[in-house]
Image: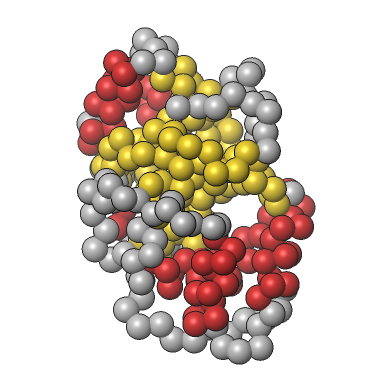
Amino acid sequence: MPEVTHCSLDSHPARIEPDNRLVVLARTIQASNSEAEATLRDGVMNWVRFGDTCLGQALYRHRSVFQNAADAPMWSHLELSYFRDIVPADVILELVFNRQSNGVHLLRAEILLTTPSSFILPRDWRGSADRPERKASLEYIRVQPKHLRDYRNAMRDYCGLAAMKLVQENRFGTFRAMETAAVLFRAPEMTIDWNQIHLCELDPNGFDGFGKEFAAALRVALQSGVDLPDAFADLGRIRTVPRWTFNDFVVEEDSAIGREV
């Protein structure tokens, strides 16, 4: 990819940098009924039980598929739990290895790390569940392992920079790129695989993918001389997107992460 030079952006949103990465426990779940969802929701709303290192939780319900290249069951919910430094062992025991509540079927549990310079929130972040026109876009991405460093660099130099501009302009609520550090549990029927999850709050009406949005933002954010089509083509060669869904906000209790950046 070509070398890029960053230009100045006024009123920078806050973003997680390489020396300030958050740790996230993600659970991919099939909830069989409304009572099971209520149990999950109540647990998220009681996130303070996990102690001072916990920065909150969020729960999203599957609504529709934007892109699907995987012959695997669809799940109903994704739960994210945010922590400083590490996920405590007792939290992992409770959420992953202990018996799940009735109607809650755990399909996958993993530890995610925030991707440097690509985890971006507005400085006054208070959650986005009060914006009903927006949905949670969840991209499940598989990057070829030998290209993980190249992908991280591309996220920092291109996608993260574009996303920062789009958050600044309130076109996106946030853009949160996270990468899998360890898979703690995977159900036998969970044949789909990924090593990145990207979360973004946006209005799906008329949305035609991140490529166009990012390219337009980069033309403003970067100095001339950068070949944008080649930059995004390089990403296409080193990753696949086995599943991309739009999701409703069930509950977001994650405003504390804004104070970390």
Residue 74 located left or right of residue 98: right
Residue appearing at x 39%, y 12% in the figure: 103
x, y percent for residue 49: 24, 31
Q: Nearer the viewer, residue 17 or 134?
A: 134
Residue appearing at x 66%, y 88% in the figure: 225
- Where is 225 relative to 104, above or below? below
Say whether residue 57 is visible.
no
Q: Nearer the viewer, residue 135 or 110?
A: 135
State the image quarter where residue 10 is shown: bottom left
- Where is 14 relative to 24, above or below? below
x, y percent for residue 139: 54, 46
Residue extending farthest front: 206
x, y percent for residue 83: 37, 44
- Where is 225 relative to 11, above or below? below
Residue appearing at x 31%, y 18% in the figure: 34
Looking at the image, what colour scheme do you see? secondary structure
Counting every numbered tag in the picture gives 0
Residue appearing at x 31%, y 50% in the figure: 133
Say whether residue 68 is visible.
yes
- The N terminus: image quadrant: bottom right
x, y percent for residue 249: 33, 40
- The C terminus: image quadrant: bottom left
Q: Nearer the viewer, residue 257 or 71?
A: 71
State the image quarter where residue 169 is shown: bottom left
